[in-house]
Image: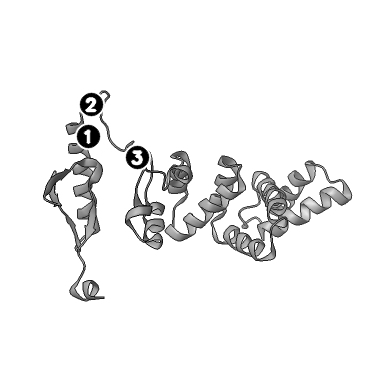
């Protein structure tokens, strides 16, 4: 509906020379006629027009299959998310990436804002690795999609400068709380966990901590 409203106003602005004052009058008329109807403030209607103008141009240049896919992305995210993405991001490919992640992960508006602020799009999969040489291609791509670089620990309250041991201790505290919140089926393997590979001992520090789900016998067998 918002897309169509934006389209109608945009087309009329071009054909009939409607000025910005029309939106003010339209908003007032709608609120007078339908006082219980929400979402038609002057500001909101301007966003409808902006959405149509911006995405109609970017989507219209795409192949039909891509066009429908991107229209679906826009229609599936909440209106507040759409406004946030338009305000914070200019690159259309980045916009659609965040839309897809929002739908896949069920992000709230605040979570989406945090992901954009921390630049998740450019951080994801950027960590130096040798997965291409050590994992099958399908698995290496999947692992890369889950990794971020650099890691941002702004949820900690450490004052700089701090030593590695302090960072590790604070991360462990948050990890313990997180595992308790998850409930049954998860385990914390250990701190400074010893791993022996080809008769050499390695000790995983805070940067190597993993949350490992405890699989049932049926899951392990499959």
Residue 74 in percent (x, y) is at: 60, 57
**Label 2 crowding class (10 Å Cα cut-off): few <14, some 14-19, many 20+?**
few
Q: Which residue is mark 1?
A: 167
Q: Residue at x 23, y 44 (%)?
A: 174
Question: Badge 3 is on which residue?
Answer: 151
Calculate the distance from the C-alpha at mark 3 to the C-alpha at mark 1: 13 Å
Q: Secondary structure at mark 1?
A: helix
Q: Position of residue 212 (x, y in %)?
A: 22, 57
In depth, the one of 94 and 38 nearer the eye is 94
Expressed as whole percent of the image width and height from the top left, the position of residue 37 reads 63, 57
Callouts 2 and 3 close, C-beta under 8 Å: no
Q: Position of residue 207 (x, y in %)?
A: 25, 42
**Occupied quadrant, residue 114:** top left
Q: Is residue 5 left or right of residue 203?
A: right
User: In the image, what residue occupies the spot 67% across and 52% down?
Assistant: 55
Asked if one can make out residue 217 in the rendered structure from this viewpoint, the answer is yes
Name the residue at 43% across, 39% down. Answer: 118
- Name the residue beneath numbered marker 2: 162
3D distance between C-alphas at marks 2 and 1: 7 Å
Please tell me in which quadrant of the rendered image residue 179 appears.
bottom left
Of the two numbered discs 2 and 3 on the same chain, state the one appearing first in sequence.
3
Q: Which mark is residue 91?
A: none
Left or right, 200 with respect to 118, comes to: left
Asked whether disc 2 touches disc 1, contact meaning CB atoms under 8 Å apart, the reply is yes
- Label 1 neighbour load within 10 Å: few <14, some 14-19, many 20+: some
Is 215 rendered above or below residue 82? below
Q: Is residue 220 above or below residue 203?
A: below
Q: Residue furthest top?
A: 161
Whether residue 33 appears in this view of the structure is: no
Label tally: 3
Disc 2 secondary structure class:
loop
């Amino acid at each position: 509906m918002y897309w169509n409203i934006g389209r109608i106003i945009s087309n009329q602005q071009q054909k009939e020379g409607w000025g910005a004052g029309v939106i003010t009058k339209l908003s007032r008329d709608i609120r007078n006629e339908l006082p219980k109807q929400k979402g038609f403030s002057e500001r909101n209607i301007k966003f409808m027009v902006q959405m149509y103008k911006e995405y109609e141009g970017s989507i219209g240049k795409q192949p039909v299959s891509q066009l429908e896919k991107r229209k679906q992305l826009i229609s599936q995210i909440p209106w507040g998310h759409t406004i946030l993405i338009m305000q914070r991001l200019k690159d259309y490919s980045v916009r659609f990436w965040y839309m897809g992640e929002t739908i896949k992960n069920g992000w709230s508006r605040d979570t989406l804002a945090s992901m954009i602020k921390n630049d998740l799009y450019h951080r994801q999969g950027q960590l130096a690795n040798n997965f291409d040489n050590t994992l099958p291609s399908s698995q290496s791509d999947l692992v890369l999609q889950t990794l971020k670089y650099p890691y941002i620990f702004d949820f900690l309250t450490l004052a700089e400068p701090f030593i590695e041991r302090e960072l590790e201790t604070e991360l462990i505290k948050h990890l313990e709380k997180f595992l308790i919140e998850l409930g049954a089926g998860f385990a914390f393997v250990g701190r400074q966990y010893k791993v022996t590979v080809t008769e050499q001992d390695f000790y995983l520090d805070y940067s190597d901590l993993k949350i490992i789900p405890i699989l049932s016998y049926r899951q392990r067998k499959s």
